[in-house]
């Protein structure tokens, strides 16, 4: 493969990151041991952090109550790349300020629709990646509709406008290029989910079979869905299955009830897929809390990936 040309925008991106970090205090309650990560392995994380809603705040579950827990749990993972979902502007600024070792991409641009506040308006799916490990080569976003270049466009009865964010990176540890796409599919319409994933799969399909690609996000479907099967049929592999085979996974949504045995059991709907010369060698559903505070109504999911 031809050696990639390093971007002359490197210094600009270095300066663009914030350098202020607010220390986190409290007891981090862990559910898993430390991983032994190889020198060139990739630690990938997908996090639905739950939008900052007034109705959650009234129950003591708003972002102000969860912020420290969310940041502490994320920092503990020491991820190389993180795909986020359900991020409002204030939350994005908190992530940038407190995860200053990462470059953050994917929030700027036209808002989702005419609403300025709340769940409908500006929740997005940014990607954060290690400044030390990666150089940003190019990046973009598109809308999950029949008109993907039209901001806030809706198709197939989607309840909300949805978009995907992608970055193409140079891994300075291995001198390899890789690409990560991060998304959040519709939460209501199966037709919308199926149409939206087709847009993503078609957009990623021109890349060569030996080009490393990663797909993260909240798919709002389980492994028994047509959406999941469409991803697999397009040549992607589920990192969970690569590690655990046919073992049935735990659910990743819990409605802020965590390990409450009385809560309704859920499906695993947060996934990390890979394509090309990448293989999952460890995968975790992260149940950590800080002083008993859950970071979100989703468990975060991590995968340790190895170049093959």
Image (cartoon, rainbow, N blue to C red):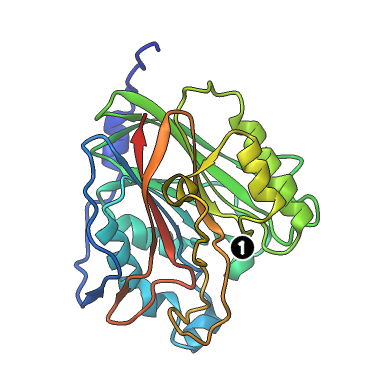
State whether residue 203 is above or below residue 93: above
For residue 159, side relative to residue 86 (left or right): right
| Residue position marked by numbered label 1 in the rendering | 121
State the quadrant of the N terminus: top left
**Residue 53, percent across and down?**
53, 76
Residue at 50 percent of width and 68 percent of height = 50
The reply, left or right, for residue 12 in relation to residue 86 is left
Circle 1 residues within 10 Å: few <14, some 14–19, many ≥20: some
Quadrant for the C terminus in the image: top left
The furthest residue to the top? 2
205 over 160 or under it: above or below: above
Between 3 and 274, the one lying in front of the other is 274
Asked where in the image residue 98 lies, by quadrant, the reply is bottom left
Secondary-structure class at tag 1: helix
**Percent x, y of residue 25:** 19, 74
What residue sits 68% from the left and 60% below the top?
A: 114
Where residue 129 sits in the image (x, y, percent)? 34, 44
| Residue name at image x 67 percent, y 58 percent | 186
For this rendering, which residue is in front, 39 or 2? 39
Residue 265 shows in the view: yes
Residue 223, by quadrant, is: bottom right
Relative to 283, is 195 on the left or the right? right
226 shown above or below 260: above
């Amino acid at each position: 493969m031809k050696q990639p040309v390093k971007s002359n925008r490197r210094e600009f991106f270095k300066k663009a990151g914030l350098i202020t970090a607010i220390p986190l205090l409290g007891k981090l309650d862990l559910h898993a041991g430390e991983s032994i990560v190889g020198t060139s392995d990739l630690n990938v994380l997908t996090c639905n952090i739950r939008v900052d809603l007034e109705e959650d705040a009234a129950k003591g579950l708003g972002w102000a109550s969860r912020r420290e827990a969310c940041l502490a749990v994320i920092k503990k993972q020491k991820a190389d790349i993180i795909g986020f979902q359900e991020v409002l502007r204030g939350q994005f600024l908190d992530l940038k300020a407190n995860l200053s070792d990462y470059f953050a991409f994917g929030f700027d641009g036209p808002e989702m629709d005419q609403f300025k506040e709340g769940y409908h308006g500006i929740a997005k799916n940014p990607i954060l990646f290690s400044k030390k490990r990666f150089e940003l080569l190019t990046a973009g976003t598109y809308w999950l509709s029949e008109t993907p270049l039209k901001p806030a466009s809706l198709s197939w009865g989607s309840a909300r406008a949805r978009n995907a964010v992608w970055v193409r990176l140079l891994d300075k540890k291995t001198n390899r290029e890789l690409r990560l796409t991060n998304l959040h599919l519709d939460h209501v319409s199966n037709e919308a989910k199926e149409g939206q994933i087709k847009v993503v799969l078609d957009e990623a399909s021109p890349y060569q079979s030996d080009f490393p690609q990663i797909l993260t996000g909240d798919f709002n479907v389980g492994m028994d869905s047509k959406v999941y099967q469409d991803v697999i049929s397009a040549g992607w592999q589920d990192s969970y299955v690569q590690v655990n085979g046919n073992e049935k996974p735990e659910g990743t949504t819990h409605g802020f009830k965590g390990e409450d045995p009385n809560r309704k059991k859920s499906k695993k709907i947060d996934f990390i897929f890979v394509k090309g010369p990448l293989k999952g060698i460890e995968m975790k559903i992260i149940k950590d809390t800080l002083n008993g505070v859950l970071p979100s109504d989703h468990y975060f999911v991590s995968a340790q990936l190895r170049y093959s």
